Image: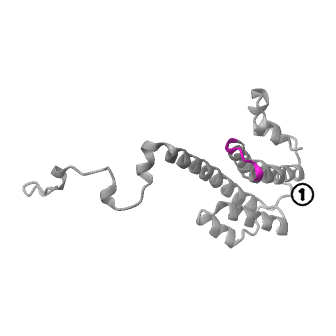
Amino acid sequence: MSRLFSIITSDDPAVRDRSLDAAVRGLSGPELLDECRRLDQFRRDCPNLYQRVRSLFFLYAIHRFHLPALGQTPTGAALPESGKIPFSGYEHLLNRRFPEAIDTFLAEQQKQGSSIALSSALAEAYHRLAFQTLADQVRRSVRTVRGNQWMFRTGHPADLPLRLRSELLQADRDAMRY
């Protein structure tokens, strides 16, 4: 069982509010990568939005800060600073297809091994996916409120309840402005 699952899923504030730094302190590179693998699978399967977003931010922090600071591969060797970042994963990242980018980067990590460059790419993808997940939830929540539905209607501009005052549409020839 992952030591991070209990922090994410616990109802007890003493466990839930424990810092990630304290939870991963003392883990070796291979153990930290194993935690990442488990955490990634957890976030894919988790139906709970809060837990999914929290696991995404944990993955971001581990790849951005903890793995590079630790500097060990699963074999215990020094973590290389440079490495290949697949161009297709980079394209997915630019096109805001974060799950595909993560899958591409993880496949490359399985193929070539871990590197600081690949951890940096994974951190960026996890970070952006976390905020995209939150934004999608806000969008869903806002759309469910009846008074907000006008913002999401598509159709003719005249259907929108927003109008410009007629005074704003008249040109003021003396002042050379509207």
- Residue 24 visible in the current orientation: no
Mark 1 belongs to which amino acid? Pro
Left or right: residue 28 versus residue 134 is right
Query: Percent x, y for residue 173?
Result: 8, 58
Quadrant into which the C terminus falls: bottom left
- Which residue is outermost to the right? 75
Q: Quadrant of residue 84?
A: bottom right
Query: Percent x, y for residue 158?
Result: 30, 58
Q: Quadrant of residue 88?
A: bottom right
**Number of numbered discs overlaid on the protein picture:** 1
Answer few, some or many: residues within 10 Å of disc 1's Cα (few below 14, many 20 plus, some between 14 and 19): some
- Which residue is outermost to the front? 146
The answer to which of 13 and 73 lies nearer the viewer is: 13
- Residue 137 visible in the current orientation: yes
Q: Considering the numbered disc 1 on the image, is that residue within a helix, a strand or a loop?
A: loop
145 above or below 110? above
The residue that appears at 89% across and 57% down in the rendered structure is 74
Quadrant into which the N terminus falls: top right
Query: Percent x, y for residue 7?
Result: 79, 37
The colouring scheme, among rainbow, by chain, secondary structure or one colour, is one colour
The residue that appears at 59% across and 47% down in the rendered structure is 137
Is residue 13 shown in magenta?
no
The answer to which of 138 and 23 lies nearer the viewer is: 138
- Which residue is outermost to the bottom? 87
Q: Dot 1 corresponds to which residue? A: 74
Left or right: residue 176 versus residue 61 is left
Q: Which residues fall within the magenta stretch?
A: 45-50
Query: Percent x, y for residue 164?
Result: 24, 51
Is residue 47 shown in magenta?
yes
